[in-house]
Image (cartoon, rainbow, N blue to C red):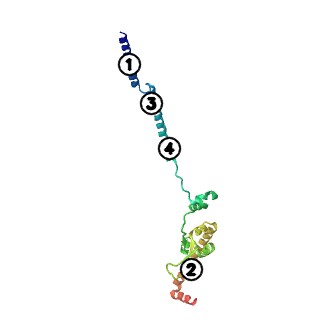
Amino acid sequence: MPSTKADKARKQERRDRQQSKDAAEVRGPKAGTKAGTKRAKTGKGATSAMDAKGAAGAEGAEESKQVEVPVRERPGERFGDLSGEPFGGTVRRKEAQPAFRRPLFLPRGSLRRRGWTDSGIVRFLGEPDAHAPNPVVPSAARMRLYDEERVAAVEATETWREWRTASEHRREAARIRAEERAQERAERIARTGVYAELASHVANR
């Protein structure tokens, strides 16, 4: 009998150890033995190290993306601090300059159509701004040309306006006198005949 009780106790002890082992395997290494706990801690540490390494790699990649490539400065920019603008400011002054405009020159015929006379041209404009060959008669004297901007500036003055008004009155009076003389001549020819008029012209030469 004693041997039977001892056998039963050993069997019960083996059964309990087996159940404890099975329960530990079911719960996992964290809730099991010390070795399982150590393995769990080691695995967690390795996972944390891998996560930290991955985060560091991601930050490094992000920093490499944000690194700006240095721009090579031009020779003029090295001296920009000395003058306040790049290389003496030639670039800015060039951009500030207006576009080149080719000047427009007016001949005397165009000036007469604008109300000018020969005496007015000499008085207000003086010497011409340019000369050009005569397109109709190349052997004739060169045409005198005047800058249109200078002509417009003179025409904007009050002195020139007063002169033009007086000149128009003088020309109108001269036109009226010429018409009166032509009318008197026509009446005289009608009274005396064409031969008498021709004889007077010959005598007055």
Tell me which numbered mark, 1 or 2, is placed earlier along the sequence: 1
Q: CA distance from mark 4 to mark 1?
A: 57 Å
Give the residue number, with chain letter if any, for mark 2.
181
Would you say 4 lies left or right of 84 here?
left
Dot 3 and dot 1 residues touching (CB under 8 Å): no
In whole angstroms, how far apart are the C-alphas of marks 3 and 1?
26 Å
Q: Residue 153 at x, y = what percent?
A: 60, 67
Between the C-alphas of marks 3 and 4, the distance is: 31 Å
User: 201 or 97: which is nearer to us?
Assistant: 97
Does 52 sit left or right of 18 as displayed? right
Count up the numbered dots: 4
Q: Nearer the viewer, residue 162 or 199?
A: 162
Frontmost of labels 3 and 4 is: 3
List the residue tagged with mark 4.
60
Say which element carries label 4: helix
- Asked if the residue at tag 2 contacts the one at tag 1, i.e. Cβ–Cβ closer than 8 Å, the answer is no
The kind of residue on which mark 1 rests is Arg
Contact, mark 4 vs mark 1 (Cβ under 8 Å):
no
Q: Earlier in the sequence, mark 4 or mark 2?
A: 4
The secondary element bearing badge 2 is classed as: helix
- Marks 3 and 4, the one that precedes in the sequence: 3
Indicate the amino acid at tag 2. Answer: Arg
Q: Mark number for residue 39? A: 3
Q: Is residue 205 above or below residue 25?
A: below
Q: Residues within 10 Å of mark 2 (few under 14, many from 20)?
A: few
Rendered view: 120 above or below 76: below
